[in-house]
Amino acid sequence: MWANSVSGLRFSGNTVATAVLSSVVRAGGEPVVLFEQSNLTPQERLVGFDGVLVPGGNDIQPSLYGQPTGPETKVAESAGQDEFERTILRAAIELRLPVLAICRGFQMFNVMHGGSLIQDLPARHEIHRNDHHDVDVVSDSRLASVLGGVEQIRVSSYHHQAVERLGFGLRAVATAEDGIVEAIEPVDPAIPVVAVQWHPEDTAATESQQQGLFDWLIETAAVPASEARV
């Protein structure tokens, strides 16, 4: 994620939460951060990679889902961030690489499939802005399998936007008690994607189910693309 100001740097920088990187390392992976700018195609950039993780960040440009920008929407500091993430996600899906999409990544996964977002949640959804709350998980979903078969899990939430219209070819596989969609995945089980609205990295160091999302990514990445990935 491009940031115009980073502590310790004179100018702009490329940032990602250390909790995300640590969670990947605990799972046995080696995290490599891609920079937004490149002379390569998205497919070329992913050569040699075994999986993709799209983390949280600022809001997506509402024009991508046909809305004007609302007063509470804070888009990414780089105008190219949305296109970068969208094309990398698309390339990963085409290459059948496993993908874990978190918060902004979850929202981009929905938008790139024709879905839309609520730009600012009403006050009655306050638990999503900076709190912990329970999420109900669909029992026959990939997510449920990744989480060890649980049908409810407590999550760390930090977002002010949410799914409004679900994207084509996707299904909601987890919801909060107030009806907000908390996880989506492809209807096609051959596409190895798990997308969650919450931040599993916040508690992954102490909660095995949250760490399990990163474990799934690394374990699935270790399976050759020519073999079945679930």
Image (cartoon, rainbow, N blue to C red):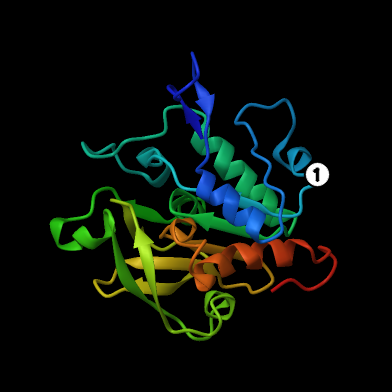
Q: How many numbered circles are shown?
A: 1
Q: Which of 59 and 93 is in front in this view?
A: 59
Residue type highlighted by circle 1: Val
Mark 1: which secondary structure?
Answer: loop
Residue lying furthest top: 10
The residue lying at 24 percent from left, 49 percent from top is 120
The residue lying at 49 percent from left, 15 percent from top is 11
Residue 224's x, y, as percent? 84, 64
Q: Nearer the viewer, residue 222 or 99?
A: 222
Asked if 148 appears above or below 72 in the picture, the reply is below
Residue 220's x, y, as percent? 72, 66
The residue lying at 62 percent from left, 31 percent from top is 35
Residue 192, visible in the rendered structure: no
Residue lying furthest left: 123
Asked if 18 appears above or below 152 in the picture, the reply is above
Q: In this view, does 13 lie to the left or right of 73?
A: right
List the residue tagged with mark 1. Answer: 47
Q: Nearer the viewer, residue 66 or 154?
A: 154
Residue 108's x, y, as percent? 48, 49
Residue 56, visible in the rendered structure: yes
- Which quarter of the figure has residue 46? top right
Q: In this view, does 139 lie to the left or right of 159?
A: right
Label 1: how many Cα within 10 Å (few below 14, some 14–19, many 20+): few
- Which quarter of the figure has residue 68? top left
Residue 88's x, y, as percent? 63, 44
Instruction: Name the quarter where the C terminus is drawn.
Output: bottom right
Asked if 47 appears above or below 188 in the picture, the reply is above
